[in-house]
Amino acid sequence: MNKEKIKHIVEASLLAAGRPLSLDALAGVFGIEAPSRDELLEAIEALRADYESRGIMLAEVASGYRVQVRSNMADWISRLWEERPPRYSRALMETLALIAYRQPITRAEIEEIRGVSVSTNIVRTLGERNWVRVVGHRDVPGKPAMYGTTREFLDYFGLKRLDELPPLSELRDIDQVNPELAFESAQQQVPAVSVEGDSEASSSPEDGRQSGPSDATDEVPEPVADSAPPHGETLARQDTTHAEEAADPETGAVDGPEGSDFRAEERDANGSESNARDSGNVVPLKKPGSA
């Protein structure tokens, strides 16, 4: 099969799939005529060069390759969808950033850094989006759950590996996380999320009292992704004791929560993390990729 036809088949596959495709997945499209990995990579690089001066690009993310809209096209492309993009609270985005940069991290450690209680709704929402999952349990009294990001998190934000996250020193405000990290297409929008504070620390409807400090309610727009919906539109658990065993050796992220009991782990964590925090045995936090 000649190189031009291989390139055309690879391009058509990436446009039709609506999700990232690995080299193995691309090879499977060809059947018994499957080209070598070098030939596939050559076709991918040829497509990347073809798209250099166009409104789309070929990107490599954690799960493989995909054709996506360039981020500088977002202002125009977003008008294709009438629904308002979902907005996430500042508290949710701060929690996600802490998990991404400090993983594996427990809920108690997040609360210690932020200075307020972490809403159960926030953790649940992050789990439902498949952005975070339980990757193990801290070896301290209560065995609190440790959270880490998933491969879906990397794909959503257009990253191949965790070390592609912008340095924390460059992020003076949580709002700066979004522009660099592109956002998921509006085709994949979910209902607007309202996570405004901790359910354990919110005002009681009976007496109106507040039991503790709560999360801020400032909203952050959902990051507009360079991803791609299918068919030619904008192209886009088994838990372990130690997070290192759950992490992908190449991306640094763990696989998605398929088959995991994320909610059950979160329920267990609610009653155990405060014990871990009180015990004073919090493990020092490290930035991904640090020694």
Image (spheres, helix red, strand yellow):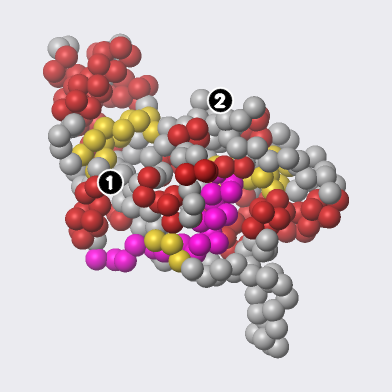
Identify whether 287 is placed above or below 131. Answer: above
Q: Nearer the viewer, residue 117 or 264?
A: 117
**Place of residue 94 in the rendered image (x, y in percent of width and height, measured from the top left):** 54, 55
Q: Which residues are magenta?
A: 82-100
User: Which disc number belongs to residue 249?
Assistant: 2
Circle 1 is placed at which residue position? Answer: 71
**Place of residue 107 in the rendered image (x, y in percent of width and height, measured from the top left):** 68, 53
Mark found first going from the N terminus, 2 or 1: 1
**Residue sitting at 73 percent across and 59 percent down?**
270
Tag 2: amino acid? Pro
Tag 1: amino acid? Ser
Q: CA distance from mark 2 to mark 1?
A: 29 Å
Quadrant where the N terminus is found in the figure: top left
In the structure shown, which secondary structural element does the residue marked by tag 1 occupy? Answer: helix
Q: Quadrant of residue 85?
A: bottom left
- Let me know if residue 231 appears in the view: no
